[in-house]
Amino acid sequence: MRRRLEKLLLNRTWRHILFWVCWVVGFTFIKSFGKSYEIYFGNFSYYILTLPIFVAHTYLVAYLLIPRFLSKKYISVFASLFLALFYGFSVVELILSNEFIFVWYPTGSEVTGNYLAPGTVIKSGLGNLYIVLVFLAARTIRNWYQADNKRKELQQFELQQQMENTVSKVQPLMLLYAIDHIDRMVDSSSPEVTRAIALTSELLSEVMMYHGQDQQLFSREIELVKKLVSLVALFRESKPDVEFFISGDPGHIQLPPMILFSFVDLIFRKFEKEQSIPELNIEASSFSNMITIQVLHGSMRRHNEDLEECMQSIQQLEQYYPGKVTISYATHSYGCSVIIRNNPHSSVNTIHMLPDVVDMA
């Protein structure tokens, strides 16, 4: 029941209908309390028949006068039109009530002779003005409630962004990967354990410094990837085969920070338990503002495995950088190719397969 009511209140039309139904029923009960059934019916008929007058008066004030005149500080125009509507609708309501409703239905109100006297019109108008004030108060409370919810959503979004930025800076999965391998090196009494600890600490420190820089150049990220390769070489006792092909000034490449580092880290961790890590050929072009990564497996690997591993890495990368990049991929008999471009104007990442890839195996 509560959920149905919440959905009802979200719909503007039904919300207004609910307001006016509550007003008619509520005031009928208040004005007729303790009286006979005929009085209840008479007052209910009065509020139903005069409802168009109150609705028109209320909506003209709320949706015409206030936004077009009062909000723009045309105070004199607003006051003049407000008084004209106040007096005019009060006259219409008195005529309808005294000439028709009070004659047809028993409401407990008597027809007065001079009901259009200015004093009577103003007195009746003050009563009619009450519903306008109630409507404006309800509308103000709702706007405040929406603004408060919006503020909370923005705070939640900012908190989530801060958490994502922190995770991106610390690179927790890479850190856990390094700690796990350092533990293994300690257990095996490896002579390189001291160097591995120092290089891990140095790499994490440089990653944090890179995030703190005002201008995060892609050339600096390439140096971080090279240092990650050196660290993995200590863990595996064999240096991964990673080649860089740079065209133009890599400092002019505009991509989200740490995207190349994150992808290379994904590949290293994905093949942690394999005997060998795929060869990586990384092309960075400042002219086309993109990077191309070729992940080259051994000839014995199956095509389906290549596609699955490539897609898993791409999907994880997309989760790290939602709405920021366009990713194209292709699979070959020797591995897969991934092209990453900047995507500054889209709210959702674009991932698609490259057509007609030439097999160079």
Image: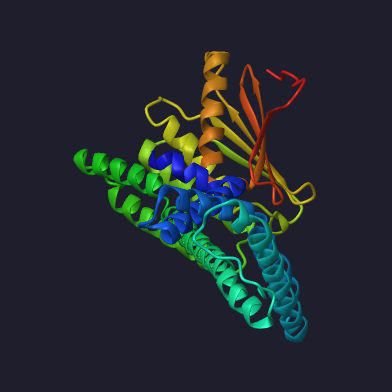
Query: Which residue occupies 68% across, 82% down?
Result: 118
| Residue reaching furthest to the bottom | 76
Q: Is residue 350 above or below residue 172?
A: above
Q: Is residue 51 above or below residue 347?
A: below
Q: For this view, does 216 lie left or right of residue 88?
A: left
Image quarter where the C terminus lies is top right
Query: Which residue occupies 66% across, 64% down?
Result: 93
Question: 229 or 77, which is in the foreground?
Answer: 77
Query: Which residue occupies 51% across, 48% down?
Result: 9
Q: Position of residue 42 (x, y in %)?
A: 52, 52
Q: Position of residue 248 (x, y in %)?
A: 77, 53
Image quarter where the N terminus lies is top left
State whether residue 233 appears in this view. Answer: no
| Residue reaching furthest to the front | 113
State whether residue 196 appears in this view. Answer: yes
Q: For this view, does 354 lie left or right of residue 184?
A: right
Query: Which residue occupies 42% across, 40% down?
Result: 3
Question: 171 or 31, which is in the foreground?
Answer: 31
Q: Position of residue 186 (x, y in %)?
A: 22, 44
Q: Is residue 58 above or below residue 66?
A: above
Q: Is residue 224 above or below residue 303?
A: below
Rendered image coloring scheme: rainbow
Q: For this view, does 214 lie left or right of residue 5?
A: right
Question: 149 or 323, which is in the foreground?
Answer: 149
Q: For this view, does 235 lie left or right of residue 266?
A: left
Q: Position of residue 88 (x, y in %)?
A: 73, 71
Question: 38 or 355, which is in the foreground?
Answer: 38
Task: Quadrant for residue 74, please give it.
Answer: bottom right
